[in-house]
Image (cartoon, coloured by chain):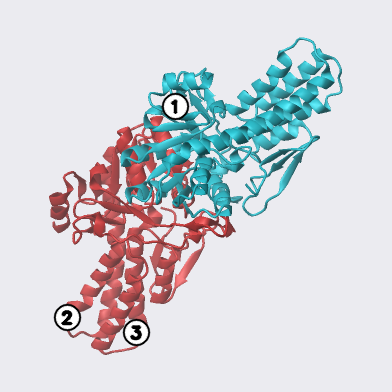
Chain colours: A red, B cyan
């Protein structure tokens, strides 16, 4: 990867502002937790694994800036920061998972030296970041067998280096297969309303020299019927115990279309995206964002003023439409229930 | 309708420029056939029935402006104009149908008075325009029984007053049901890349006070799974003898999703959209437009420069996914083959 999605810089966190891509590669420097929270909420940084890393770094920043030496007060401050982070985006579980990991660091002991705790929290945030990169590489290695020479791989939204600490989940699989020498084409749904496909995925892939073709979301079915798509790979924001998967809006429709055309449909995600507390996808909260994302584009209003618009940021794909889930621990196939549980607990 | 999509003004044709809607309602005045052809090609006017009317008026304009008094020369000029018109857009058959009707006027006699022929051609163009309005009203009357109180009707692209001489096909059905007093909601796919849904359909419907909700194309499947959509109504650009239907890209995917969710999927079109010369949809040419329509959004480049994009303007929905075709002569149901032929020939 020739770019850094997120970077810990000791006294600040530097984020690549994804809203300006691909036109400008500019960075946001966050000096406190609340500016990290804002960057997550406004989607300067997005992608389930990346926002988990960002939230952890936000907590580590807050710890560094704390003035208290009293453990009880420090703990209270940190809990407040976590609460703020939790409010940013409701669907991707990695955010909550990362905050829980940070929380465990101070929950493990009743009394502690605050200065030492700050160092522990910084180390934990960096560990979450580094683990995510390693996990992504493993997902790529585990999944690359699914891509064959001459394939047409369709992906949706951005599950790449920009959605993670680096490398990517669905795109990680693509990078690993490409690096191995396999040659194939990638089709990228533009992914309205925020165009993470045409802006971000196309940008990443073309920097790596991988042949990339953009399509509007409504072209996928037609392309499948023409047999140009032979495999669908997407990321995930939360996976319930039975394999039901929340991912960027449009994923569900793609999964139905894949099933209809007999095209394998795979989800690539780290096990931190598994939420074993949920029996099925019904329990996953779906974020509803501002309708203006649909009625406007790049500051230009496209729809009449009086019109309503809906804007669910995610949808839930039932496990019955998913061929397999590619994780850092291997590819899990149906029936997902027991296998996901076993894998997460390993 | 409080707007005029196309209007014959004796010495010119006035078109509502649909590229500027909904932000501005501005008109293009075409004084000759080549500016009509350009308006069709650049989609200032679009929609299968509307471009048929426009092409006929373009021929009538060319006739008016002709300087010759010799029938053979006049005929040659007219054939050239028809040829130019035929080059504009390949998929919608109404364009060819309308040109054939104009051609018949001079083909009926070997010798004629050129001045009289000019009047005949003007009269024929106006007749095509007026018939289209009547046909649309009938489609509305025939189809309105399909909409029930409380329905959620999803439509794609624009098959409304703006796509026809007035009133509309799929939207004609909606207008007729609404005028009768039925109350329901309409969901409008924005229809990338040119946003005929959020720009044109939403504009038309909200002017008529019909509750309209815009969604990005990739939200339709999710909305169906939530049972919010109870009926899908779309227009058509060409219908083959077996019922296979070419319509705006994305229609095919919607039809598959409708089938999957058990939601009735209807096509509304005049019989002039039937092409009995084609056994199936395989013979319908699908227009491929500039990739820039996809890589740009509302004039702003969104994708990296190096990236390819595909841009088929239409797709073909197989007859097996279509519940029925609403025409001015009634609703045709499967098996379409014989029934379409009989109806067209009636």
Q: Identify the secondary structure beneath mark 1.
A: loop
- Residue at mark 1: B244
Which chain is disc 1 placed on?
A: B
Report the mark closest to the observer, 3 or 1: 1
- Residue at mark 3: A66
Residue B153 image point, x, y percent: 43, 46
The one nearer the camera, A260 or A240, is: A260
Residue A222 image point, x, y percent: 43, 34
Q: Identify the secondary structure beneath mark 2.
A: loop
Q: Residue at x 34, y 34 (%)?
A: A230
- Residue at mark 2: A109
Q: Is residue B173 left or right of residue A346?
A: right
**Mark 2 or mark 3: whose residue is earlier in sequence:** 3
Determine which quarter of the picture holds residue B35.
top right
Q: Is residue B335 left or right of residue B166?
A: left
Mark count: 3
């Amino acid at each position: 990867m020739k770019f850094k999605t997120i970077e810990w810089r000791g006294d600040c966190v530097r984020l690549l502002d994804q809203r300006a891509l691909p036109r400008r590669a500019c960075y946001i420097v966050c000096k406190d937790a609340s500016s990290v929270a804002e960057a997550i909420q406004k989607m300067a940084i997005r992608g389930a694994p990346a926002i988990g890393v960002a939230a952890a770094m936000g907590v580590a920043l807050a710890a560094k800036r704390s003035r208290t030496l009293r453990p009880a007060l420090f703990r209270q401050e940190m809990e407040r920061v976590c609460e703020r982070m939790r409010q940013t985006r409701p669907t991707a579980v990695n955010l909550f998972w990362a905050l829980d990991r940070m929380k465990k660091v101070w929950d493990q002991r009743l009394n502690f030296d605050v200065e030492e705790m700050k160092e522990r929290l910084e180390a934990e945030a960096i560990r979450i970041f580094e683990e995510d990169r390693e996990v992504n590489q493993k997902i790529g290695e585990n999944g690359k067998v699914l891509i064959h020479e001459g394939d047409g791989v369709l992906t949706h939204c951005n599950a790449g280096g920009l959605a993670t600490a680096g490398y990517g989940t669905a795109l990680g699989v693509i990078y690993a297969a490409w690096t191995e020498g396999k040659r194939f084409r990638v089709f990228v749904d533009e992914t309205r309303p925020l165009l993470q496909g045409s802006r971000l995925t196309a940008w990443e892939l073309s920097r790596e020299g991988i042949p990339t073709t953009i399509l509007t979301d409504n072209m996928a079915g037609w392309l499948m019927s023409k047999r140009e798509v032979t495999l669908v790979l997407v990321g995930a924001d939360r996976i319930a115990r039975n394999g039901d998967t929340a991912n960027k809006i449009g994923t569900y429709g793609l999964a139905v279309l894949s099933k209809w055309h007999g095209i394998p449909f795979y989800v690539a995600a780290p096990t931190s995206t598994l939420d074993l507390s949920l029996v099925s996808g019904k329990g996953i909260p779906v974020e509803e964002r501002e309708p203006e994302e649909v009625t406007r584009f790049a500051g230009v209003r496209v729809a009449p003023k009086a019109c309503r618009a809906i804007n669910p940021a995610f949808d839930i794909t039932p496990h019955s439409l998913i061929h397999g889930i590619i994780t850092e621990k291997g590819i899990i196939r149906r029936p997902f229930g027991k296998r996901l549980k076993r894998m997460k607990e390993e």
